[in-house]
Image (cartoon, grey):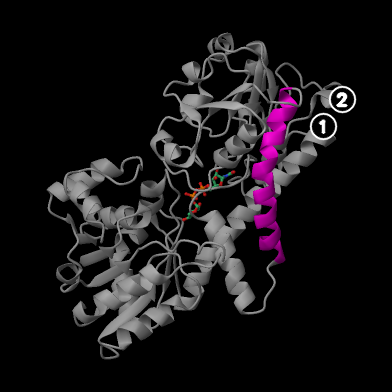
Amino acid sequence: MKITMIGTGYVGLVSGTCFAHWGNDVICVDKNAAKIAGLNQGILPIYEPELDGLVSKYHQAGRLSFTCDLAAAVKDADIVFIAVGTPARAGHGDADLSFVYMAAKEIAPHLAEGAVVVVKSTVPVGTGDAVDKIIGSVRRRGSYSVASNPEFLREGAAIPDFLKPDRVVIGVEDMHAQTVLMQLYRDVFAPHDVPVVVTRRRTSELIKYAANAFLATKITFMNELADLCELAGSDISDLALGIGLDRRIGSCFLNAGPGYGGSCFPKDTLALLRTAQDYGVALRVVEETVTANEARKRKMALKVLDAVGGDVDGLTIAVLGLTFKPDTDDMREAPSVPLIETLQRFGATIRAFDPVGMPNAAQMLDDVALIDDPYECARNADAVVIVTEWDCIRRLDLTRLRKRMNAPVLVDLRNAVSQESAEAAGFRITMIGKPTRNHKETQPVLQGRGARGRLHTGNDEKAGTAGRSRL
Ligand code: UDX
């Protein structure tokens, strides 16, 4: 099929490339001429594992092209996806839909007869109706369709998430749109038996927000339980294991940390609350999730203060990991930013390392020495704080790290390293959701190996690593 993708950000570029991977002819459109010029030279505007290989493969095969010429890109398209940004409006929380509406207005006069316009951007309930109205103001009803097809891509895992999704959600108001979209996704259904949810447009729009809000709530639930674990002498990793094996709960998204960030959970939870307010409905669980998450990010600085004895004034703190999660260069709403700013306000000097995110971090942080080697970053530091659980940080040689430092203080906000290894390397380690020191003596010592949870399945047992839930 001939597909046009309006927008070449995280969603548009990944989706367009994957549609080309399935054999479609895809034209990606963006107003940003520099971005389009870069893409035509194989320079990607975002970091996403595997994306550059696929983009160059299908660009060279002539199935994936990039242009600023929207009219030319739309005129022969069977499907036109709108995948532009819907940022939170500053100070309001609701989604800024101006880019979506602008795209609808610009494509309307150029649509081919029978074209299906699909909103892939994350948009509040009813946006599809508004897009339909915009296009309907210049085109005959029945000569086009407007549908919703939200994405559920995680940054850092966007390609596998797109090519083998848990499900496809299609929101349609006419059979033509349903037929065309079912044909587009047939390559996913058959080989990977992916379920397809076909519903109305407004339900499809709300499914996206509900999914993100639920995931944000699940994470926040674990983050708050982690605080209880620390004082109650329990272990959050074992707790995650113990509840996650319940199929009704599931073992994903049970990793307690410094609070969720990224371009979606913070934005989408706020936008959902605004939608609820518009309809006079109180989503109290989501409200508390938003409040608790913001508070948690600030609270992490106090964890560092506690670990160094109460005062960081004049100390050097090395922060390992800046991006909001591993395998992305994205710094949006990253917990590292409020943490660093608070520690600086308390008088700390900050050095920081991130394998990919430092160019973006440099735009957001002041007076931070960005160092491209974690051991060098820790040189003469009075404490090291792990904020993002990159693999290269999980695998650090802790003895070598300790030798570079002034003091043996390690604060691991992701439980990324093993407590035993850190203590063997001479660190006093503070983790998330682990019994604080004065509970150690009450914790029963499991036979043989450490105090980590053990999974006994039949007559074999798996070591404590099972305590870390899968993301
Ligand atoms: C999310 C949704 O997962 C995805 O389906 C949607 O399309 C976009 O938003 P993303 O924001 O890229 O994806 O990352 P995700 O992996 O969901 O992590 C979001 C935040 O939650 C990160 O800050 C991450 O560190 C945090 N997180 C995630 C936890 O703290 N604990 C977990 O167990 C999982």
Counting residues from the N terminus, which is met first, the one under dot 2 or under dot 1?
A: 1
- Circle 2: residue type: Thr
Tell whether 77 sits left or right of 470.
left
- The quadrant where residue 357 appears: top left
Q: Residue at x 40, y 68 (%)?
A: 149
Whether residue 174 is visible here, answered yes or no, is: no
Residue on which disc 1 sits: 233
- Disc tally is 2
- Residue 193 location, x and y as percent? 40, 58
| Circle on res. 187 | none
Q: Amino acid at mark 1?
A: Gly
Main secondary structure found in the magenta portion: helix
Mark 2 in CB contact with mark 1 (< 8 angstroms): yes
Residue at image position (62%, 49%) is 250
Does the magenta run of residues contain 456?
no
Instruction: Give the structural element (helix, strand or loop) at label 2.
Output: helix
Looking at the picture, does residue 236 appear above or below residue 125? Answer: above
Camera sees residue 250: yes
Q: Is residue 383 left or right of residue 204?
A: right
Q: Which mark is residue 442?
A: 2
Instruction: Name the quadrant containing residue 226.
Output: top right
Q: Which x, y percent locates residue 274? A: 59, 70
Quick one: SS at disc 1?
loop
Q: Quadrant of residue 3?
A: bottom left
Residue that sits furthest to the right in the current view = 442
Residue 374 on image: x %, y %: 48, 21
Front position in the image: 64 or 69: 69
- Asked if the stretch drawn in magenta spans residue 288, the answer is yes
